Amino acid sequence: MLQPIIEMQDLSRRFGDFIAVDSINMSIPPGEVFGLLGRNGAGKTTVIKMLATLLEPSSGHAKVGGFDVVQNAARVRRIIGYVPQALSADGDLTGYENLSIFAKLYDIPRAERKVRIRDALAFMSLSAVSRNLVKTYSGGMIRRLEIAQSTLHHPRVLFLDEPTVGLDPVARISVWEQLEKLQAQFGSAIFLTTHYLEEAERLCNRVAIMNRGKITAIGTPAELSASVGPNANFEEAFEYYTQDETSMRGAYDETSQTRLASHRLG
Ligand SMILES: Nc1ncnc2c1ncn2[C@@H]1O[C@H](COP(=O)(O)OP(=O)(O)OP(=O)(O)O)[C@@H](O)[C@H]1O
């Protein structure tokens, strides 16, 4: 098997006494589009922030591109792109100016900057509005600009935290299409969090379902559906794997528990 691009080993994060991420283990191969799914508060953002070197683990380890996210944080930062959940582009600058800041941040040589920015704008279908202030953009356009910003340096992994939250269905589809194009052209791995099941099914090669800090299932969307029942759909699988453990204990027989455990190990 190829050397994983992302590896997590007993990765945990506490806030005081509260365990937000509870000893998770996962490996993601290069080029995979991987979705971390869960309800609000499951711990998804905390995982992505640890992988993107923005938050230190309380215990356990993670590597991105073979580099430890704590010991080699600077090396990790050079090979990743990160799009946070809240819209973050500067509304008082133009699209071009926002990209220009990131080109400098990523140390893209001065001679190459213009071409990279022009290509990124064209790639995200933003060329026509590049000289307009970002505050005049729609939510979908801002998201596409942020994806352009965070991929200017052609990262090996792109982290996206809830990339289409708050977008209308048309804007959501346009973001999905740009992400698919990006993956096809550069082969970057994409690690995204979402609570939209349709997004995960459309974009992701594999998904993991997270509930109260733990990974309860991992596999392709089709595998997870099949693991719940012969005719189950992905929504039913999500419901199943995000139930509270107490209700699971009561409601499911031993076979189901074994199946759940085998997914945890998978
Ligand atoms: N800095 C912090 N201090 C204290 N608790 C925190 C902090 N950050 C996150 N938490 C808690 O950790 C848990 C997981 O939060 P996290 O943001 O990772 O969840 P999430 O799955 O990304 O949810 P959402 O979809 O709402 O963003 C939540 O209960 C949250 O309140």
Image (spheres, rainbow, N blue to C red):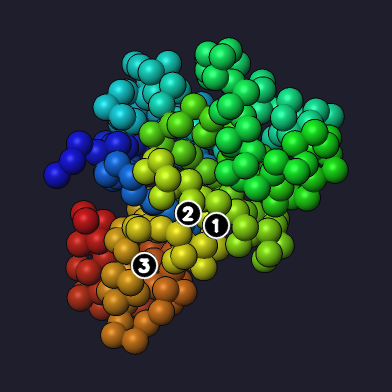
Q: Specify the quadrant of the image occupied by residue 127.
A: top right
92 vs 244, left or right, is right
Q: Nearest the camera: 27 or 249?
A: 27
For the C terminus, which image quadrant? bottom left
Q: Residues within 10 Å of mark 1 (few under 14, many from 20)?
A: some
Task: Answer whether labels 1 and 3 touch (C-beta < 8 Å).
Answer: no
Q: Secondary structure at mark 3?
A: helix
| Identity of the residue drawn at 26% across and 78% down | 253
Q: Which residue is mark 1?
A: 177
Q: CA distance from mark 2 to mark 1?
A: 5 Å
Q: Amino acid at mark 3?
A: Pro
247 vs 150, left or right, is left
Q: Amino acid at mark 1?
A: Glu
Q: CA distance from mark 3 to mark 2?
A: 17 Å
Which mark is drawn over residue 22? none
Q: Is residue 98 above or below residue 31?
A: above
Taking the image as drawn, is residue 94 in sight? yes
200 vs 262, left or right, is right
Q: Secondary structure at mark 2?
A: helix
State the image coordinates of residue 6 (x, y, percent, origin top left): 32, 37
Task: Answer whether labels 3 and 2 touch (C-beta < 8 Å).
Answer: no
Q: Which residue is mark 3?
A: 221
| Identity of the residue drawn at 68% across and 64% down | 170
Q: Amino acid at mark 2?
A: Glu
Outermost residue on the left side: it is: 1
Q: Specify the quadrant of the image occupied by residue 211.
A: bottom left
Q: Which residue is mark 2?
A: 180
Q: Residues within 10 Å of mark 3 (few under 14, many from 20)?
A: many
Between discs 3 and 2, the one toward the N terminus: 2
State the image coordinates of residue 249 (x, y, percent, origin top left): 33, 70
